[in-house]
Image (cartoon, coloured by chain):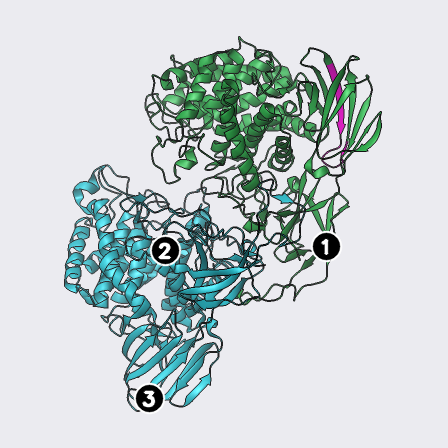
Chain colours: A green, B cyan
């Protein structure tokens, strides 16, 4: 492992700044997304989603909970974790300031105002939570299972780090609040304190990053302590089981992610952080192996994770039903957090694959075009038409249904918002010899290599629709360095065009190492022909089905009533082709049998099949944006 | 519809005594199960399950809640519906007295004692619930959504009816308690009372049967009023949705059972009762159509109902995943209650089919051999080995895992117990011309036909293993009457042997109408060759799979580790054969691919398949009775 030793106190928004690792992440000041698919979403995020989230949090009293009057009375509103939504919003706003494209001044003012609101609720000893510890409220840490106190503090810490790295600097008031809160946590739960853990991991992530920002070793030590403490069933017994709370098994003994998906992914991400900072390579390999098995056996085609609604949990290996696929938006965000940390630590390009997949098929699906409606869960099969959601009604629970403006448990919108605002940080890294491009978007890159030389690139990419990627060198000296391009798994047959000519390049990382000239272009042509994809036969839920993918996108059949998706059979012998704004396959429709007992003697297939007709498929991320519809990703094949 | 006008006050245990209908149910004094599969289970129920349930209810304080001291204090124990478990146990004990084979005296004494305990907790105005209305408790009916007050009262009424019909008679103290409780409910929720409904249907069933027993019209009216009141979303909003509480849609407008399975089935059963008693044939047809569609689209091969753990609910049409199939024991019991009522009303033999299926594959599966452990839910696919359950530990929740001795929500054991104790009532009816045999068990039948003539039969049946059924006439005069036999759907090729010779008989009801002689035998030979069964192709979860059935039994592959059920492929071209105590199929095992991203270009099937070997299957109801095991009902076919 190469120690790249970044300046940990540097301003320049970066969510994760490990002190060592194979790759060094770049900051928002080094990579800017300038156009295309993701820039459009970033702009909607800034102009619609952030104000929308603020407005709902005010309306529901979640920000108001911080004022002493409400917090001390029985009128505190919302679930016990609503503080964290305010912090996630603060974090998202901070990254948005770091992105630096919009009304930064107004955002700065809002952050300052919210910081004041939050700061006023902090106890003298640093404790900060609006649902516990005040007159009329339960005692602090009296409900470690569900209280979410440390969880909320973790998000506060992440928000403060974001603020400090995007203009707030070392003297920002939110950072001061976070340091007091972290000091309190280290005091209360340190080696001489209560030996407890929170029912929801997250504090660990906040502590490590605050340690990275501030250089405070004890924050890192406390994070490590929390991680080692987990898994010993010290939390109370609950019908969800200890696995739900990531407390059934020490993280070092686990072989796969399990239990509540977001909890498990946050914990795994924090464990990577701790392993990196403490040089514990065995722990790092353990988490990497857990994630490997999770990707091989517990991940949806979309990259979504978590197959169970009841406890928002990973299923057993290969239990990946399309119906009511849980695949929470937050689990997608959390999986990107984990994959990104593993990528920085190991340099293994496989992590790029899953980040790309989740971005295009979970994150892009989650948010409505208007930025004011979103999915909490991501089913892969909608059998009865989604109804429109009331624009001003908070949705209870996280079940099926259309994109909703807000949820009682509303983690997903601010979670996606903080990711989108910081998205440029997930595109590019610097390694020993140069610049690595992990995700392609229209972007401007300007950074220093490890040896201090300044380089710059301009990227133009038509993804997800078009596979042409052009990388123009905008700054260089005459010494050699490397530009590493990624040929995704889906892009077999890719070609690279440089000043040296055109050549086929295999899937994986392509290193172009030499001297470059300003203005020189490297062009990567990634085939985006639509393709059939089949599932591992051990996944029972999708046996006999194919899906269609094109480039990084998963496609789906969506019907507003004109097509019966229950009796659809795709002709898997006729490859899918581009057609209009979608992809076309040939499909037949079986005549459904009588509505009778649905089990009987096996019959030959297709004996009542109608002629084949063209069927148009649309990108999964586009579904449910029109009227009420049914939808399926996995298509039974003839 | 024929009005058969039974004597509604007759003693002689019968759970359901409609005043009209195509068929007249017989009582426990008219049908006794004398041996075989079900008698063994009835005996275990009497000697083990009933004392086990009593012991746990005492230990957990559920019976103790009825004493004023506990009920009035903060020490009341258990969930808000535990009263109902005491009532269900009282009902089961009453039917056990009616069965009349065991220590009836000791049971009578226990019933009297528990009746005293219960009666002491009844308020002067008839209200009876241990969690509401006393000092320090929430007010009566302050939580219609979750309070379960009327639900508990419904079970009290059913228990009292059972007691009255099995020896208690009109003067039994439990009946007096029930009448006072019912009078209170009519007062509180009648046309001039609160226009509310309970979050869990059940009161309706109790009220109708109490009306049948006592002739009190207003109990019936109140049940009808509750049914008409439901479905108007008068209960508070909840994240499970109104459908969970059967309050989303008036029962007359619904086309299929939906929402929480037990709630929906109880309500449907009560609606049949009300439709029958009020002569509302349209309402009867509506419920029958709902159940038809439920059987065609929302029922597991086992007859189990409910596919969702999160809200214990029916899934959408054709959403029947084997993994974590919910299929609650209580939903099985409730579906039998509904099917039985529809059978009595319509005489349609299709309802026998589902009753048989549920009995052998849900009810028989639910209870451990020792009668002291049971399944709450019935998965059809266990991927990781079940662990043994601690013998003295209450299981929280109702999730996966082995048969457990007790559950925090412990409705299933007493529910199955009351069904098993009264099981003889579900075997035989009397129609216009004679006796109809619906389920075959070793039994003695002695009844009067509609015209008053006394007839008797002795049945010997080897089911589920052997398909020979012998019916011997034990009492008759010289006038003709009919013996109607059922040839189940699974018994194509059946033969009937009478004094007139042997003949093939088709699936369905076979009416033998003539004069019989005492000692004369009718023999029905039902083929029980094992058979493959395929699912409706619209059921995505089981596409490409077959199951094996034999007679009324569903079979499964169970492995204690020696066989990898993930890679199993059954050769569906080789029919299953009897082998030892099970059934044998030919199976291959595919070599699993690399543990990598599990989606990719379609590959030809079976390119890495090993040679075929015999694979033994066992009856589903036998699974998880040995050591930890994996299991699957649906077997991928080559």
* Disc 1, SS: loop
Locate residue B313, reporting x and y percent: 45, 51
Chain of the residue under the numbered disc 1 shown in the image:
A
The answer to whether residue B373 is seen in the rendering is: yes
Locate residue B124, reporting x and y percent: 18, 49
The answer to whether residue B286 is seen in the rendering is: no
Residue B242 lies, with reference to residue B513, above or below; the image says above
Q: Which residue is the site of mark 3?
A: B516
Q: Which residue is the site of mark 2?
A: B330
**For residue B40, which numbered disc appears in the image?**
none
Measured in 3D between alpha carbons, the distance from the residue under mark 3 to the one under mark 2, in whole angstroms, is: 41 Å
Chain of the residue under the numbered disc 3 shown in the image:
B
The reply to whether label 1 and label 2 mark residues of one chain is no
Q: Quadrant of residue A573?
A: bottom right
Q: Label 1: few (<14), some or many (≥20) within 10 Å?
A: few
A464 magenta-colored: yes
Measured in 3D between alpha carbons, the distance from the residue under mark 1 to the one under mark 2, in whole angstroms, is: 46 Å
* Disc 2, SS: helix
| Magenta part of the chain | A455-468
Residue B340 lies, with reference to residue A125, above or below; the image says below
Q: Which residue is the site of mark 1?
A: A573
Could you tell whether B475 is left or right of A443 in the image?
left
Between A307 and A324, the one lying in front of the other is: A307
């Amino acid at each position: 492992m190469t120690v790249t030793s970044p300046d940990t106190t540097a301003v320049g928004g970066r969510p994760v700044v490990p002190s060592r690792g194979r790759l060094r992440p770049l900051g928002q000041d080094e990579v800017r997304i300038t156009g295309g698919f993701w820039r459009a979403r970033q702009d909607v995020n800034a102009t619609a989603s952030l104000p929308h989230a603020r407005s709902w949090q005010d309306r529901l009293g979640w920000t108001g909970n911080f004022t002493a009057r409400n917090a001390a009375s029985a009128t505190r509103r919302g679930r016990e974790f609503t503080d964290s939504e305010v912090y996630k919003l603060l974090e998202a706003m901070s990254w948005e300031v770091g992105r630096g494209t919009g009304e930064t001044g107004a955002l700065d003012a809002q952050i300052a105002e919210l910081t004041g609101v939050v700061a006023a609720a902090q106890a003298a000893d640093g404790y900060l939570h609006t649902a516990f510890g005040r007159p009329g409220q339960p005692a602090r840490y009296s409900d470690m299972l569900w209280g979410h106190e440390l969880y909320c503090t973790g998000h506060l810490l992440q928000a403060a780090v974001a603020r400090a790295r995007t203009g707030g600097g070392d003297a920002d008031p939110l950072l001061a609040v976070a340091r007091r809160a972290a000091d309190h946590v280290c005091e209360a739960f340190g080696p001489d304190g209560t030996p407890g853990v929170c029912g929801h991991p997250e504090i660990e992530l906040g502590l490590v990053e605050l340690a990275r920002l501030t250089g405070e070793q004890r924050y890192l030590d406390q994070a490590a302590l929390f991680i080692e403490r987990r898994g010993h069933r010290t939390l109370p017994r609950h019908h969800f089981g200890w696995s739900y709370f990531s407390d059934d098994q020490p993280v070092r003994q686990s072989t796969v992610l399990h239990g509540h998906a977001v909890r498990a992914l946050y914990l795994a991400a924090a464990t990577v952080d701790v392993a990196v900072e403490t040089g514990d390579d065995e722990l790092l390999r353990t988490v990497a192996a857990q994630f490997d098995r999770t990707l091989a056996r517990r991940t949806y085609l979309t990259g979504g994770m978590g197959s169970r609604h009841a406890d928002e949990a990973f299923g057993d290996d290969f239990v990946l039903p399309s119906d009511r696929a849980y695949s929470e938006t937050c689990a997608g965000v959390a999986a990107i957090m984990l994959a990104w940390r593993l990528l920085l630590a190991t340099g293994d390009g496989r992590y790029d694959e899953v980040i790309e997949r989740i971005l295009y098929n979970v994150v892009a699906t989650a948010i409505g075009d208007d930025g004011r409606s979103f999915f909490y869960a991501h089913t892969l099969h909608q059998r009865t038409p989604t109804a429109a959601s009331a624009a001003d009604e908070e949705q209870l629970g996280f079940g099926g249904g259309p994109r909703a403006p807000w949820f009682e448990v509303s983690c997903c919108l601010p979670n996606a918002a903080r990711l989108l605002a910081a998205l440029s940080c997930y595109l590019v890294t610097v390694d020993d010899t140069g610049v690595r491009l992990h995700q392609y978007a229209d972007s401007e890159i300007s950074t220093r290599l490890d040896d201090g030389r300044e380089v710059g690139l301009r990227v133009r990419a038509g993804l997800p629709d078009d596979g042409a990627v052009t990388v123009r060198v905008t700054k260089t000296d005459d010494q050699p360095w490397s530009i590493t391009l990624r040929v995704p798994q889906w892009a077999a047959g890719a070609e690279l065009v440089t000043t040296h000519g055109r050549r086929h390049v295999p899937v994986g990382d392509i290193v172009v190492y030499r001297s470059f000239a300003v203005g020189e272009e490297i062009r990567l042509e990634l085939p985006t022909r639509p393709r059939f994809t089949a599932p591992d036969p051990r996944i029972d839920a999708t046996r006999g089905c194919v899906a269609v993918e094109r480039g990084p996108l998963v496609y789906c059949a969506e019907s507003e009533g004109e097509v019966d998706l229950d009796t659809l059979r795709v002709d898997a012998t006729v490859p899918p082709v581009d057609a209009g704004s979608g992809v076309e396959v040939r499909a037949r429709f079986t005549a459904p049998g009588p509505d009778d007992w649905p089990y009987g003697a096996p019959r030959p297939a297709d004996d009542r099949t109608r002629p084949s007709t063209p069927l148009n498929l649309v990108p999964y991320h586009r579904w449910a944006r029109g009227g009420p519809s049914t939808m399926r990703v996995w298509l039974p094949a003839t």
